[in-house]
Amino acid sequence: MVSISGALASAFRAYQTGNLFEAEWTCQQIVQQQPGYVPALHLLGAIAYQTGRLDTAIAHYQQILRVDPNHAEAHGNLAVALQERKDWQQARMHFQKALELDPDHAPTHFNFGNLLRQQEDWEGAIAQYQQAIALNPNYARAHNNLANVLRQWGEREAAVEHYYKAIALEPDNPQTYNNLGNVLQEMGQFEAAIAQYQKSLTLQADNPEVYFNLGNAMSSLGQFEAAITYYHSALNLGFDRAEVYNNLGLVLRECNYLEQAVEQFQRAISLAPNNGESYVNLGSVLYEQNDLAGAITQYRQAIALNPDHADAHLNLSFALLASGDLKQGFVEYEWRVKYKEFGIQLEKPRWDGSDLRGKTILLFAEMGLGDAIHCIRYVPLVAQKGGQILVDCRPELVRLFSEIPELSQVIPRGASHPPYDVYSPLFSLPHLFGHTLDTIPAQVPYLPVPDTGVQLPERASENLNVGIAWASAVPSRELATPDAYSRYLIHSYKSKTASLPIFMALQSVPGVKLYSLQVGSHAADISLYGFEQSLVDLSNHIQDLADTATLISQLDLVISVDTAVAHLSGALGKPVWVVLPFACDWRWMQQREDSPWYPTMRLFRQDATGDWAGAIAKVVDALREWKH
C-alpha cells in the first residue's frame, strides 16, 4: 500500500505536469483515508480554483481552516477565491488574517492589492503593491499592477516608471507593453504609445485589444486611414465591442465615409443601446448628410438615456437652429456653458433679461470672433433695458467694438473688469430676447466703420475690387486633443476651409481685382501656391478686425468661407458672398441662398461633401453676371 506522503508526492507530480484529473483523484483518495490532511486539501483547492469551480475550492480551503485556523496560505487562497466570487467583505477579512499570520508574504500583499483595486480603494491598493515590491523588488506583476493603479489615480509619470520596471524584469510579457502604451497615450505621447503597442504585437500578434488601442492612437495623430485598418483588425480578431464600432465610425466620418460611419454607429448602438455617445455620433453624421430630422431623433434618444448629456443637448441645438426652430434651439444652446472651453467662469449673477436701470451688465464674448460679431447686434436691445454695458472680448475685437456708441467700455480678454452687477454670455442674448426667424434684429450696418487710416493698395475704380478669405481659423495646438469639444473645433475648421488654388478660379473673371483678407497661418498660402502677382496680400495691413473692417469698407464685394470676415462684412452691410460646405453651420440653415441674419449676404453651397470646386464654379458664374 502506498503511503500518504508517497501518494501526495505522486499527486504533486501529476499536478506539475498538467494532469489535473490524476492529481485530483489521488488527493481525493488521500482525504478519504485521512479527511483532515491539509496538504491534500490545499492541492484540491488549487485544482478546483484553476478549473473554475469556485464553490468547491472555497469548501476545500474552509475545511483546511477548520483543521488549522492559523494556516496563512489557506486564508490567502480562500480570499482570492472569495474575491472572484465577488464576496468582497469576506475576501478582505481573510486577506487581513493571512497577513496577520504572515506579514512578509509578498503574493498575499499582491492579491490583497488586486482586491482593493477592484473596490477602487486606490490608496490601499498602492500600499499593498508597494509592500509586495518592498518584500520582493523583482516582482514584475506587482510593478505592473501598481502602475495600473497609479494610472487610474492620475499619477501617470509614476505609472510609466513602474511599467518600465515590470518590462525590465519580464520583457516577454505583451500585456505590460500594452499597458504602458495606454498610459503614454493618455499623456498625449502618441508616437511613444504606438511603439509600445507594436512591441506588444511582436510578442502576441493576435491580441485584438492592442489593435484597438493602436487605432485610437493613430486617430489622435490624425492618421485616420491607418486607424481604420487597425480597428478592422481588432474586429476581425473577435473584439466585437461597441467602443470599437463607435471609434471606427468617428474616423470614417473624418474621412468623409459617411454611409459607412452610419453603419458603424448603428452597430455600436445595437451592442450598447444605453450608451448615449453613439447616438450623438450617429446624429452628427446624419447632420452632415443634411438629415436634420434624423439627427434630432438621435440626439433626443441620447438625452432620454441621460438628461444631463451636454454633448447631446448642444448638438440638438445645432440641428434645431439649422431647421429654423430658433426659440427651442437657443434654449438647448445654453448647454454650451457646461464646457470649460467657453471660459464662462464669472462670479456675478447671470442676467435674466430684466430691467437694468441703475446697474451695469458685462457681456462676455465667449466663442469665436465671428460669433462675437454675429451677436454684438444685440447691444442696442440690451441698452433699451437701461444701465451701462461692458463687453469682454478677444483683443482683436477691442477697437472694432469700441466704435459702438451704446458700449461704456470694451475690455480685452484677460484684463480686470470694472465693477458690474450682472453678466451674460453674448450668445445667450438671442435666447433671452426670444427671437424667431421673423424677429431677428437684422438691420445693417450695426457696426460703424473704424477710422484706422488703413488704405486699400492698388485700388482701381475701373475694376470690381473683391476681397477674399478661403480658410477658417486654425484651432490652437492645445485644443488638438481627442476630447469632444476639440474634435468639434478641428472638424469644423476642416469642413469650412477651402484650397486657395480652387478659390483662385475667381481670377478668370475679367475686370476683377482680388485682395486677400486672410490672416494667420493661411496667409502664407499666397506665396506657397505662387499667387503673389494675381492676389494682393493685405495681411501686413491688418493688425486687428478694426483694420479688416476699414479695408472691407473700401471693397465692392467680399467672397469668403464661413469665417469672421463673412460676419464682419455682413455686419457692415457690405455685399458678401459666403461659400459653404455641404453640411454647414446652423446659422446658414439649409437650401437658402440668403441669410435672415445679414440682408446683404448671398450663400453658395456645396452640392456634395468637400465639393469646393463646384461651389466656387457657382460663384464664378455669379461674378460674371455681376460684371455684365
Image (tube, rainbow, N blue to C red):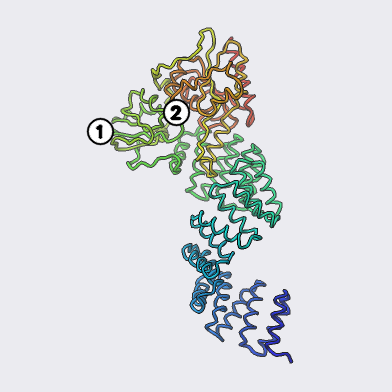
Element marked by disc 1: loop
Three-letter amino acid code at the position of disc 1: Gly
Asked if residue 302 is positioned above or below residue 174 in the image, the reply reads above
In percent of the image, x 29 and y 37: which residue is there?
Answer: 421
Q: Pick whichever, 216 or 570, lies toward us.
A: 216
What is the crowding at mark 1: few (fewer than 14 residues within 10 Å), some, or many (at least 20)? few
- Real-space Cα distance between discs 2 and 1? 27 Å
Q: Pick whichever, 210 or 13, lies toward us.
A: 13
Q: Please state the horizontal and vertical placement of residue 302, each as a whole percent of the image.
A: 54, 47
As drawn, the label of residue 374 is 2
Q: Is any atom of residue 323 visible in this view?
A: no
Q: Pick whichever, 321 or 438, lies toward us.
A: 321
Asked if residue 420 is positioned above or below residue 208 in the image, the reply reads above
Quarter the C terminus occupies = top right
Q: Is any atom of residue 610 visible in this view?
A: yes
Q: Circle 1 sits on which residue?
A: 358
- Apparent side of residue 314 relative to residue 355 in the rendered image (left or right): right
- Apparent side of residue 404 relative to residue 1 in the rendered image (left or right): left
Q: Please state the horizontal and vertical placement of residue 292, each as a whole percent of the image.
A: 57, 36
Q: Please state the horizontal and vertical placement of residue 280, each as a whole percent of the image.
A: 56, 44
